[in-house]
């Protein structure tokens, strides 16, 4: 099975108190995700990110874009992403 892809949707503009306007990750979080090797850790990170987006607001565009990325990479997205889309 392929690994859960990065939550980054290739916007990468850090304007909201250091959070990317595309995915809500900070630069430190982007680096941290790259270091995660175990699938369960990558999935937990995406779940945490969905909660963070919910708290910050204005990230409705992320879930549909991330679903497309998962489809392109032939990875089944976690349920929380499907629910958010």
Image (cartoon, grey):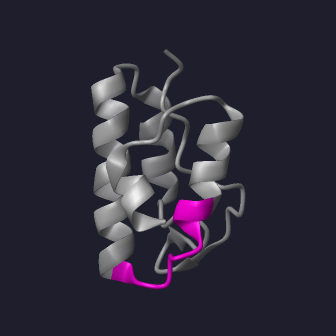
Question: In the rendered image of this protein, does residue 61 appear above or below residue 40?
Answer: below
Pick the front one: 28 or 40: 40
Q: Which residue does the image show at 42% across and 39% down from the upper left?
A: 32
User: Residue 14, how many percent across, how many down?
Assistant: 60, 71
Q: Residue at x 67, y 70 (%)?
A: 13
Q: Nearer the viewer, residue 42 or 30?
A: 42
Q: Residue at x 53, y 19 (%)?
A: 2
Rendered residue at 59%/73% (across/down): 61
* Left/right of residue 17 with respect to residue 13 in the rendered view: left
Instruction: Name the image quarter holding residue 6.
Output: top right
Q: Position of residue 19 (x, y in %)?
A: 49, 70
Part of the protein shown in magenta: 56-64
Magenta stretch: includes residue 3: no
Q: Residue 85 versus residue 23: which sits nearer the camera?
A: 85
Residue 50 x/y as whole percent: 36, 62
Q: How many marks?
A: 0
| Placement of 46 over or under 5, stated as above or below | below
């Amino acid at each position: 099975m392929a690994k859960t892809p990065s939550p980054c949707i290739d916007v990468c503009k850090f304007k909201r108190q250091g959070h990317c306007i595309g995915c809500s990750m900070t630069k430190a979080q982007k680096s941290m995700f790259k270091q995660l090797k175990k699938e369960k850790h990558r999935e937990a990170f995406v779940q945490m990110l969905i909660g963070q987006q919910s708290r910050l607001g204005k990230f409705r565009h992320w879930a549909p874009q991330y679903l497309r990325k998962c489809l392109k990479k032939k990875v089944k997205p976690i349920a929380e992403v499907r629910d958010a889309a």
